[in-house]
Amino acid sequence: MKTPTSMKPILVLLAYLFITTTQAQTTPYPDSPLLDSLLHTSPALAKVLSHPATYQLQIIYTQINRDAHNVPHFTQHTYHLNPRQYFNPASLVKLPVALLTLEKIHTLPTSITKSTTMSTGTAWHCQTPIPFAALADSSRRATVGNYIKRMLLVSDNLAYNRLYEFLGQKQLNDRLQQLGYAGSRIVRRFAPCDTAANRHTNPIAFHTLAGDTVYKQPAQTNPRTPAPPLGAIFVGRAYQAGGRVIARPYEFTTANNLPLPDITALLQTALFPESVPAPQRPQLTPPDYAFLRQYLHLTPHGSQFSPYTSPKYFDAYKKYLYYGRRPEAQPQPGLRIFNIVGMSHGYLADVAYFADSLHQSEFLLSAVLYVNQNGVLNDGTYEYDTIGEPFLAQLGQLFYQYEARRPRPFAPNLALFFQPDPKP
């Protein structure tokens, strides 16, 4: 017997409720008593903490203690952490793409570096070209290095698309699996491309400054999109499309997926590679890691990168934890934050390493929450600036203050994270 058309939205909603309820019940990480206690000392966090289902909050706080040889040891504390609870990672996926892009450069002819000019062609629908251009301003050239800078400094989506295409969907996801990130899946550009178009990636070429082609990478096709690690995913009660509201949950089944433990581990890999077993980290060089450290902590203006001198790119542009993305926020003396953020569809995330030279302290802090009170996606009505960003700012400040007075067996030598930054 066929299901009446009028019943279909109800059945989709019931399926959504079953899926999200099942996910919420599967919580392999117990809450840390220390983390739970600390969180409840701050009245500023109470609104979100008192409504865990509404805000879907997940937190990982990692203490770092150095031994007598300055070797870091990591202890994780978690709060409501559930890798089976979907959240849209948005721009968090830019960190694994940056890592794997730097690794792939080393597989090309030695004449090609992250500073080699690159061009992008087209071979399928929903692809856009970037022709070769020998620009006088080196910071505006199409290079792997500049694309990574753009991703890490201001979370540039077009730069991400170019590197997603350079890696290819299959190679990108195969490598994530090889490194042990079984629950992660990166299968989309930040563009309105369908699932088939995202399997097809553009032809790429590298050139000398005179325009001679030194390497060509043909267009690539992934025969099959990797299976969604969480099954069917529906969020919200409705979504907006084409100027009207569709009264059913929004589907994320074919979207990117990057659980909070995975992106936290990837940031630790980028900053503390020797703390990760060799088979679980990409094959990068010391200059690669220095490059990542530099652009994970720099602010748009502090980078002196010419595309970002505009007031639009204020220094707290992507430092949600601690500064809350306030244009007027002033830098905390002695504090460097190395981080990657995500903001999309009501989800707000920041994954960060704090290095504090003033108090000789350091820690990792990762958090994601959902701020969409009306339950409608794609309507542009989210509580980022009224709830999400203030919460993350207060959260980062709470742990900064706690770590500033936490006793340690040995004071950390943080010189690696406070080296002068070379000019771009």
Image: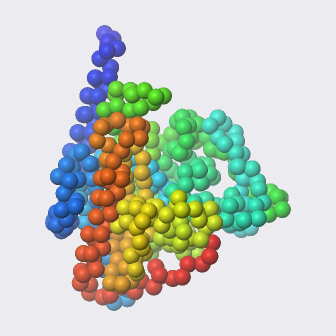
Residue 340 pos. (x, y %)? 44, 61
To which quarter of the image does residue 72 belong?
bottom left
Left or right, residue 410 beside residue 44: right
For the point 36% across and 84% down, which residue is it? 358
Which residue does the image show at 34% across and 28% down from the upper left?
A: 248
The quadrant where residue 137 appears:
bottom right
Where does residue 406 sit, x and y in percent of width and height? 24, 80
Residue 332 versus residue 54 in the image, above or below: below
Assign the N terminus to one quadrant of the image. top left
- Residue sitting farthest toward the top: 1
- Whether residue 104 is visible here, answered yes or no, is no
Q: Nearer the viewer, residue 408 or 345?
A: 345
- How many labels were placed on the picture? 0
Asked if residue 69 shows in the view, the reply is yes
At x 29% / y 17%, what residue is drawn?
Answer: 7
Is 298 in front, or is 412? 298
Identity of the residue drawn at 34% across and 31% down: 238
Q: Where is residue 164 in the image (x, y as percent from the top left)?
A: 57, 51
Q: Is residue 334 left or right of residue 236?
A: right
- In this picture, residue 213 sits left or right of residue 167: right
